[in-house]
Image (cartoon, grey):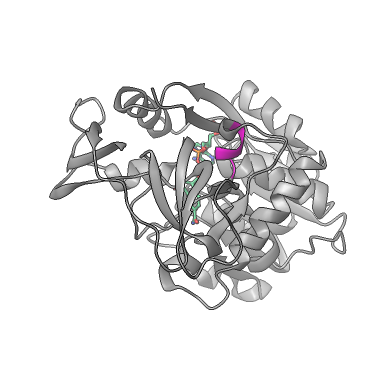
Amino acid sequence: MKAIGLSRYLPVENSESLQDFELAKPEAVDHDLLVKVKAISVNPVDTKVRAPKEQFEGPPRILGWDGAGEVVAVGQQVEHFSVGDQVYYAGDITRSGSNCEFQLVDERIVGTKPASLSFAEAAALPLTSITAWEALFERLQISAQGDDAGKLILIIGGAGGVGSIAIQLAKKLSKLNVIATASRPESQQWCLDRGADNVVNHRQSLDDELTAIDKPLVDYILCLNSTDQHWSAMAKAIKPQGKICSIVDTSKVDLSLLKSKSASFIWEFMFTRSMYKTPDMIEQQRLLNKVSELIDNGVLVTTVNTLLQPINAENLRKAHKMIEQGNAIGKLVLSDWV
Ligand SMILES: NC(=O)c1ccc[n+]([C@@H]2O[C@H](COP(=O)([O-])OP(=O)(O)OC[C@H]3O[C@@H](n4cnc5c(N)ncnc54)[C@H](OP(=O)(O)O)[C@@H]3O)[C@@H](O)[C@H]2O)c1
């Protein structure tokens, strides 16, 4: 099968940073599906894993943690899928990724692809939808049924891959009052088009920006970018007893800033369930199926914004380079092998 992988960890400008390989097709056992991959998307995690370092791989390492395709074989313990099913999934960071023609993935973290979307449109969604869903409804414990309607949420990094779906979930399902951050006219407009009520600029003082729209305090904060940079502004903006969730590493947040407000801080890491094989890992299958239904019912829309064809090392290097620039709007997808 065709695959794109790396043997060395090199800057993306180096043509050996991601290369085309021909590898043996894997075999499905246990809970695994063997999926014929039709489209993939690229996330910042791909570029972080590929980042230059002195490390070498024997068999090439295959990255990619978003895929959409068709099931071509199933392991003996598979219960929910059959050959021919169209699926979408993010996969497991501890396993080989989606940048190959045939990928093994545990059925418990796979959803049925939205019927109304192409494979490319579907591949944009899994990793970011799982992240946004778990962050909003499980970590921040916001009602997905509208019981928290009207409460204020600040989504930092609103136009990126995760923000593009988080804004929709917070607005359409939870009926929150959504303030997103974006720094450029086109990323600001993207947030408004996804349903944000206000957009403020994360390159300015967030405190001043929130005060200017008369919303200096918020019930929830979802931080999707630069946790350290925004920490003191978040601590100031969170209401007493409010909740902050971050998905981005930090080296130095001072939790004591939250003490007088009895505010909470919680992490979201979308690979936790697959990495630790938690007993509830099938929740990711359920939430992907719910996202599928919401897409097919017209409640949510895909977040794809850029499509590169075909799937090969040259286009994947291009995609990594774009993601590394840190100013993506929506999702970047590659589709079709030649
Ligand atoms: N923990 C998890 O499970 C998890 C899951 C998914 C992603 N992540 C991490 O979350 C981060 C975001 O992922 P993503 O896919 O949304 O990334 P992305 O699509 O690459 O995000 C791009 C967006 O980031 C915004 N941005 C750039 N600098 C910013 C800053 N200093 N403050 C606020 N926003 C800024 C940009 O807005 P402007 O162009 O308008 O400035 C741009 O629209 C990445 O670090 C990723 O690795 C973690």
- Determine whether, in the image, residue 46 is placed left or right of residue 297: left
User: Main structural element of the magenta stretch: helix, strand or loop?
Assistant: helix
Residue 69: x and y in percent read: 52, 41
- Determine whether, in the image, residue 204 is placed left or right of residue 50: right
Residue 216 visible in this rendered orientation of the protein:
no
Q: Nearer the viewer, residue 221 or 205?
A: 221
Q: Residue at x 56, y 31 (%)?
A: 120
Q: Which residues are magenta?
A: 121-125
Residue 49 visible in this rendered orientation of the protein:
yes
Residue 165, compared with residue 91, is above or below; it is above
Q: Nearer the viewer, residue 22 or 187?
A: 22
Q: Nearer the viewer, residue 262 or 304?
A: 304
Q: Residue at x 67, y 72 (%)?
A: 261
- Determine whether, in the image, residue 268 is placed left or right of residue 177: left
Residue 207: x and y in percent read: 65, 46
Residue 93: x and y in percent read: 38, 57
Residue 81 within the magenta-colored segment of the rendering? no
- Determine whether, in the image, residue 156 is placed left or right of residue 213: left
What is the quadrant of the N terminus in the image? Answer: top left
Q: Residue at x 22, y 40 (%)?
A: 6
What is the quadrant of the C terminus in the image? Answer: top left
Residue 49, compared with residue 262, is above or below; it is above
Count up the numbered dots.
Answer: 0
Residue 171: x and y in percent read: 79, 47
Q: Residue at x 67, y 35 (%)?
A: 302
Residue 322, compared with residue 288, is above or below; it is above
